Amino acid sequence: MGQIQLKQVTKSFGEVQVIPPLDLTIEDGEFTVFVGPSGCGKSTLLRLIAGLEDISSGHIEIDGKDATDLVPAKRGLAMVFQSYALYPHMSVRKNIAFPLRMAKMDQAEITRRVESAASVLNLTDYLDRRPGQLSGGQRQRVAIGRAIVREPAAFLFDEPLSNLDAALRVGMRLEISELHKRLETTMIYVTHDQVEAMTMADKIVVLQAGVIEQVGSPLELYRAPRNTFVAGFIGSPKMNLLTGAEAAKYDATTIGIRPEHIDVVEADGAWQGTVGVAEHLGSDTFFHIHNTGLAETITVRAIGDVNLKHGDTIHLTPRAEEIHRFDGQGLRIE
Ligand SMILES: Nc1ncnc2c1ncn2[C@@H]1O[C@H](COP(=O)(O)OP(=O)(O)O)[C@@H](O)[C@H]1O
Ligand SMILES: [Mg+2]
């Protein structure tokens, strides 16, 4: 079991309130990602759930029981940090077993849990090595192993992959997703990277300045961002947000159109402009377009390789049915 509920939770450091009253329910077994820019309060929120920080007001319930005043060890949650914090002089086996030894668990049960975790994480052949003899990805797996053996109600991850290089990050992302499918245990995962959020989450919680901007599945956020912040944050390349006369045509203060929803046409497009930078990825081409008469630079994503280069004239048509409209407060107009 691992349902976590935050009820009117706030957090202040001295005079500064970094989390205004916040309500959130994380369902048992769900993979929830907290995403938002640096400093928005993701780690603070996770540490409040873990009990590593005291909340200033409100309640935290785990599986329907008030956990607000419980010390971290009594919450039944396991945190995995960005720095792996492994003991360099101990074997992998001892590192993984460490929390169970501290809890004075029976040796036979420790062995069973360590070997089961090692098998899930493909670490069986490395149990007698020391952390220094492992790759970065393997070390991260040992840190996860140490969490698994505790059989927690939920796993809490704080940017666990940010120390890894890009290729390894993609690999570990998949491993953690697969681990979740296998264990079916609640996971809360903090990242500033919206691609990690989109690819891993059942449910994404978008935060800005301690406030939840939107909660939803990756595709709900992609298809119907509730405001211009979420619209600009979710999706890569970013959604184009246009103001002024172009938005007024659609009876909105701001309109949004994703780069993949603008078609490059031969002639007679809605917009005509000049290619600034063309990024040829092979699978896609990203064009950054100037001189359209719009106030903003337009980003367009074309499928495959499109043979246009810096300085070329380009004709564009946004797909009308894909236009998002926002009002003067930046809120979505349905
Ligand atoms: N121990 C602390 N004392 C004072 N301010 C803090 C402390 N921890 C975090 N903060 C502040 O709270 C805000 C949220 O920080 P944090 O949760 O670390 O953000 P994130 O993880 O999203 O980058 C920031 O403005 C940060 O400076
Ligand atoms: Mg953080």
Image (cartoon, grey):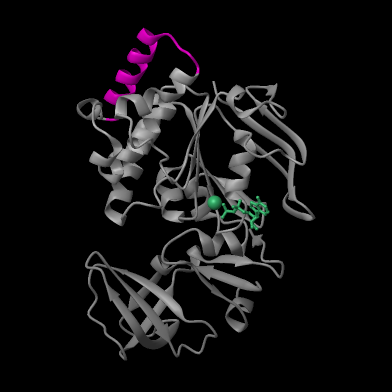
Quadrant of the image containing the N terminus: top right
Quadrant of the image containing the C terminus: bottom right
Depth order, front residue of 302/187? 187
Residue 235 among those drawn in magenta: no
In x, y percent, where is residue 148? 41, 26
Residue at left 31%, top 24%?
A: 93
In the image, the segment drawn in magenta is 103-121
Residue at left 33%, top 78%?
A: 265
Number of labels in the image equals 0
Task: From the viewer's perspective, tell me whether residue 180 is left or right of residue 34.
Answer: left
Give the overall secondary structure of the magenta segment: helix
In x, y percent, where is residue 8? 76, 40
Residue at left 57%, top 80%?
A: 246
Which quadrant contains ligand 1?
bottom right
In x, y percent, where is residue 121? 30, 30
Residue 203, compared with residue 99, is above or below; it is below
Residue at left 47%, top 81%?
A: 297
Residue 109 among those drawn in magenta: yes
